[in-house]
Image: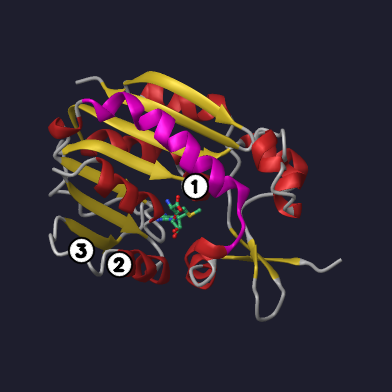
Amino acid sequence: MQEVVYLPTQNAYDLWAEIYDTNDNPLLVLDDIGLMKLLKPLLNSSDTIKTIADFGCGTGRQTFKLRTLFKNSFIYAFDLSENMLKKAQLRFDNIKEKNFRFQQMDFEKENNNFFFLKNNVDLLVSTLIIEHIKDLNLFVKKLKETLSPNGVAVLTMMHPAVFLRNSQAGFRDPETNQKIRPISFKYSISDIVNSCIKNNFLVEELLEEELDAAAMELENEKMLRWAKYPLWFGIRLRNKP
Ligand SMILES: C[S@@+](CC[C@H](N)C(=O)[O-])C[C@H]1O[C@@H](n2cnc3c(N)ncnc32)[C@H](O)[C@@H]1O
């Protein structure tokens, strides 16, 4: 069996960027479904959401969606990988209204230059990045510092049950056929929830998703492998001033 190569997160995503959006990935299917469910309660008052941040925006999959859903907002999108960011910027190429800003950022660094966001973000979204974060508590603290007094954070992640099948985020390099994985850390659902409670967040909703019968009918080998298995987890938090 071919060995998996583990690369530093930035290097792995710089390589993955080229195929990330076209790489049949059941987790992305569930992330689309789950994120919409978690955002739903905010849609009626979407006008009040003026500042949005996307932490770990990757290729801008969800950043673009946020722009469509919250039309009156300014979006700040950050990521570690320059190649992922380039893909994200491409998505926004034809948008005339420049109400967005992309910036390279490493959330592992203690002192990020967040002065322009401090207590200013009405909605913070961070999808599928937490498993790559070494210091969960520091990351949650940063979310807290960034949010406005009544701001909302929506976090999504790979379900910890995935690790029980010896799997984690990764891809096969189309050129070398080599299996590549960024560095990942396993967090239980209680690790996440407790860190949020410790940082004085109100937990509004928890959600777990698995691929249902409809997805199974796709008869895609990768989808079938994960059918009826907890694959995705998401949480909506409200900042307690
Ligand atoms: C699985 S991708 C998710 C991308 C996007 N949010 C999505 O849902 O498609 C994880 C992203 O987290 C970014 N990332 C990982 N560690 C990071 C860090 N320390 N600081 C900033 N971004 C990071 C990676 O570069 C990658 O783009």
The residue positioned 31% from the left and 48% from the top of the image is 54
Q: Which residue is mark 2?
A: 89
Q: Amino acid at mark 1?
A: Lys
Picture quarter with ligand 1: bottom left
Q: Is residue 51 above or below residue 24?
A: above
Q: Is residue 170 left or right of residue 60?
A: right
The kind of secondary structure element at disc 1 is loop
Q: Magenta residues?
A: 23-44
The foreground one among 147 and 27 is 27
Residue 151 versus residue 16 in the image, above or below: above
> How far apart in space, not on screen, are marks 2 and 3 (Cα)?
10 Å
Residue indicated by mark 3: 95
Q: Amino acid at mark 3?
A: Ile
Residue 34 against residue 12 in the figure, above or below: above
- The residues tagged by marks 2 and 1 sit, at their Cα atoms, a distance apart of 27 Å
Label 1 sits on residue? 134
* Mark 2 or mark 3, whichever is nearer to me: 3
Residue drawn at the location 12% of the way across and 60% of the way down = 97
Query: At numbered mark 3, what does the secondary structure look like: helix, strand or loop?
Result: loop
Looking at the image, what colour scheme do you see? secondary structure
* Residue 178 screen position, x and y as percent: 71, 73
Q: Looking at the image, is mark 1 or mark 3 earlier in the sequence?
A: 3
